[in-house]
Amino acid sequence: MRFSTRAIHDGQPADPTTGSIMTPIYQTSTYVQQAPGVHKGFEYARTDNPTRNALEANLASLEEARHGICFGSGLAATDAVLKLFSSGDHIVAGNDLYGGTFRLFTEVFGRFGLEFSFVDACVPQLVRDAIRPETKLIWLETPTNPLLKICDIAQIAEICNDRSILLAVDNTFSTPYLQRPISLGANLVVHSTTKYLGGHSDVIGGAVITSSDEIAEKIKYLQNAVGAVPGPMDCFLTMRGTKTLAVRLDRHCENAARIAGFLYDHPAVARVYYPGLPDHPGHELAAKQMSQFGGMVSFVLHGESEEEAKELVTRTRVFRLAESLGGVESLIEHAVSMTHGSIPPEERRKSGLSDGLIRLSIGIEDIEDLLEDIGAALETTSQ
Ligand SMILES: *Cc1c(COP(=O)(O)O)cnc(C)c1O
């Protein structure tokens, strides 16, 4: 079956007891046994829950992988991946990352002896140069957040394969509808399902996806041993989201391309970051690696003033001022004071993240309303 069909059906056969077409929310903590150890495959709901299992199968199918393991948030999923490693192990990560991922790496796992190098992973040679004998993992986001740079997954997978290093890709920005890292050679995909997969800004969740039985067994062990599991209601909401992923993403991408073009031509705007623009440095690679260019657009005004950016983000009406992304509604934010506040200024300067950067998550509203809204906010700026 093809993507949109799998999104609606995979992992979700009719409920065996009633025929319910929607997977029930199994709101239970435990399961009755016939005799000690004699049961229907379920013992305790931290270990297994049928609603969660349905979501896990659905996400694995969408990434064209064998296993999905779900967590209570995207960061809990990332945490599980890092717990595959031990004190003294070294990880190379892209230097333009979700702020919370950077904080988890450096502030939390740094204290437990994991070592990190942050490089511009859009230059594969820099990734190769950062590898040490203790390197166990390469961690990528592509498109990166918030600069929307593109890293070559297949080329970095080759660097990893040559050295038995694992490659993990945070695929939150693209979703499997636009990009499937495992088929490009990645060993692990991580998602914040909070974003496009859930898609309606009403649930927090995360997932790790892999085709390796060995890695899946270890992640599943950590899911149960650590216990950062999502509740059944949250799994249900996320699954309801994935059913419409393809239609939503088509509109997100279409609207984002229009907004990027509008900003590109606007006299108050100095730079637009959007991989769909022909002069974006990663444009060709994005066209090869992704099926469309995504729903995120960043930009800076002339002068790159932090104050002016902070003011502009309060002036839109349809675009709401909020962190997060990937929901049906359009959001606007000032990256440095909001989503990327946990990245120290010297790291931000190294990655090229301007204090004036404004990030947009383009929703699926009518494009004319979005254009008018951002246009009106910018008009005040240019006067
Ligand atoms: C939001 C986000 C995360 C963290 O996910 P949570 O669900 O908020 O824990 C990780 N990576 C990216 C790219 C994100 O946008």
Image (cartoon, rainbow, N blue to C red):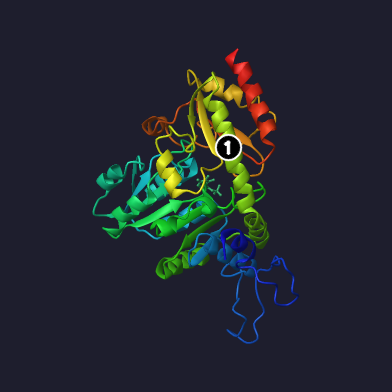
Q: Amino acid at mark 1?
A: Ala
* 33 left or right of 85 in image: right
Residue 72, percent across and down?
57, 56
* 381 left or right of 77 in image: right
**At 42% from the left edge and 47% from the top edge, which residue is drawn?**
288
**Residue 187, can we see it?**
yes
Residue 210, percent across and down?
45, 63
* 363 left or right of 269 in image: right
Look at the picture and state if 168 lies above or below 68. above
- Secondary structure at badge 1 equals helix
Residue 360, percent across and down?
57, 34
**Residue 325, can we see it?**
no
Assess disc 1: are there few (<14), some (14-19) or many (≥20) residues with their C-alpha within 10 Å of its C-alpha.
many
Residue beneath disc 1: 256
Locate residue 137: give its quadrant.
Answer: bottom left
Instruction: Check the picture and name the quadrant holding the C terminus.
Output: top right
**At 65% from the left edge and 76% from the top edge, which residue is drawn?**
31
Locate residue 359: give its quadrant.
Answer: top right
**At 67% from the left edge and 48% from the top edge, which residue is drawn?**
200
In the image as oriented, which residue stretches furthest toward the bottom? 35
Look at the picture and state if 102 lies above or below 236. above
Instruction: Check the picture and name the quadrant holding the N terminus.
Output: bottom right
